[in-house]
Amino acid sequence: MSKPIKVPSLGESVTEAIVARWFKSVGDAVALDEPLVELETDKVTVEVPSPAAGVLTEVVAQDGAEVGVGGLLGSIDDGAESAAPRKPEHPPEPVASAGNGADEAVAAASLSPAVRKLIEEHELDPATIPATGPKGRLTKGDVLAFVEAGGTAAPATPATAPAPTTKPAAPPIAPPGEVPDRPEDRRGEERVRMSRLRQVIASRLKEAQNTAAMLTTFNEIDMTALMALRAEYRDSFEKKHGVKLGFMSFFTKAAIGALKEIPAVNAEIHGDEIIYRNYYDIGVAVGTPQGLVVPVLRDADKMSFADIESKIADFGRRAREGKLAIQEMTGGTFTISNGGVYGSLLSTPILNPPQSGILGLHKIEKRPVVIDDEIAVRSMMYVALSYDHRLIDGREAVTFLVRMKEMIEDPQRLLIDV
């Protein structure tokens, strides 16, 4: 009996996906819950499992196709037998004839778009990277781990050397009002289709600019006391909780304290209404090779410092591996973005719609400051709050950062909630 393979629920506000790749071909035998196809959404990649044991009899949505929730991907016949022998889990490495690059072509054909992009960026040979995915498949985590461990680029050989290029012909003249395609530059360039994630990121960032009356206010924080506190308890904290004591837990706690005092920063405009939230779901921006994602700490006000640090570390690891669930990246009320980890000294973070505020953290840098009429060298950090001026007044935005400054500069206030 034929059973349909359908696009599963993709989470709140996500209605479409792109078919990244099929793991099986028509005629292949499949087991119950075995991954069949990988879908790429604007947030994560999702593997669709087989609804039954049987044979893949039909593929309706090919690689690259746009599909909606509930849409038909293909069909499984749970009463049929495979028309072709099943492929070995670890097929022998193909041998290329001189100059044709067949081994690279075969290896590339079995890679997901995200993995292929990483391999091309780092000029790696996929055959040299240990694979841990299902059926010996190479994952993004495998590639990242290989690079972090000091994996090197594949050596260039005459067989893989690019063919000499010829001078491109002059581009055709476009009709009035139309922009012609750019001619290919002889010095080397390539045109790559934007990923679904990057397209949606671009759309949402532009939406934030077009919709919100966005402003940014700044302040600076003396990190000396917090750094001393962290240094004093760092080892005992890690020994007890099994996670490193970072700065994000302190800033998360301080942000929640400021949000409680200035509730408009935790609110949202919906039509002609303002939705004030009495809960604190804090988004933490995480950079990945595929783009920025913002997993959410649910009810962060009820979490301990150890809970926050552990969850953020888990988010970062799974974000790099592409294993975050869609539900983990929806519904935040306020976002914290730490550009300081990349060396940013000062920036204006852009809102994450429909949120009304986002906090930007930056690098810690020693600077001369005046304390009690004397010049001292202190560890300072610039902080920025971008906010929707339709909802949040300047007084509220400034007060928010001042409260955060007070709590971070005297971190004991966080422990007694003052």
Image (cartoon, rainbow, N blue to C red):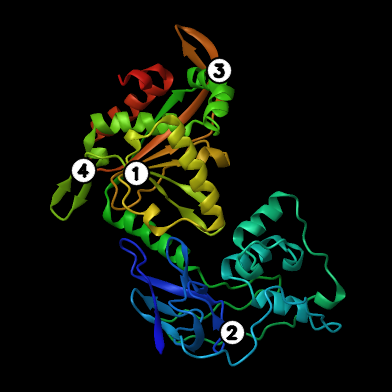
Circle 1 sits in a helix, a strand or a loop, which is it? loop
Measured as percent of width and height from the top left, residue 39 is found at 47, 71
Circle 2 residues within 10 Å: few <14, some 14–19, many ≥20: few
Circle 1 residues within 10 Å: few <14, some 14–19, many ≥20: some
Question: How much space separates mark 3 and mark 2, taking CA atoms?
Answer: 66 Å
Circle 4 residues within 10 Å: few <14, some 14–19, many ≥20: some
Name, please, the residue furthest toward the bottom.
83
Quadrant of residue 414 within the rendered picture: top left
Circle 1 sits on which residue?
Answer: 298
Q: Vertically, is 109 above or below 239? A: below
Q: Earlier in the sequence, mark 1 or mark 4?
A: 1
User: Is 82 situated left or right of 59 in this image?
Assistant: right
Q: Tag on residue 171?
A: 2
Q: Nearer the viewer, mark 4 or mark 3?
A: 3
Q: Nearer the viewer, residue 392 or 69?
A: 69
Hey, what amino acid is under mark 2?
Answer: Pro
Question: How much space separates mark 1 and mark 3, taking CA atoms?
Answer: 29 Å
Q: Tag on residue 71?
A: none
Circle 4 sits on which residue?
Answer: 391
Label 3 close to label 2 by CB (< 8 Å): no
Circle 3 sits on which residue?
Answer: 232
Question: How much space separates mark 2 and mark 1, taking CA atoms?
Answer: 54 Å
Circle 2 sits in a helix, a strand or a loop, which is it? loop
Check the picture and name the quadrant holding the N terminus: bottom left
Q: Residue at x 46, y 31 (%)?
A: 382
Hey, what amino acid is under mark 4?
Answer: Leu
User: Is 414 situated left or right of 47 in this image?
Assistant: left
User: Is 412 situated left or right of 21 in this image?
Assistant: left
Measured as percent of width and height from the top left, residue 370 is found at 48, 13
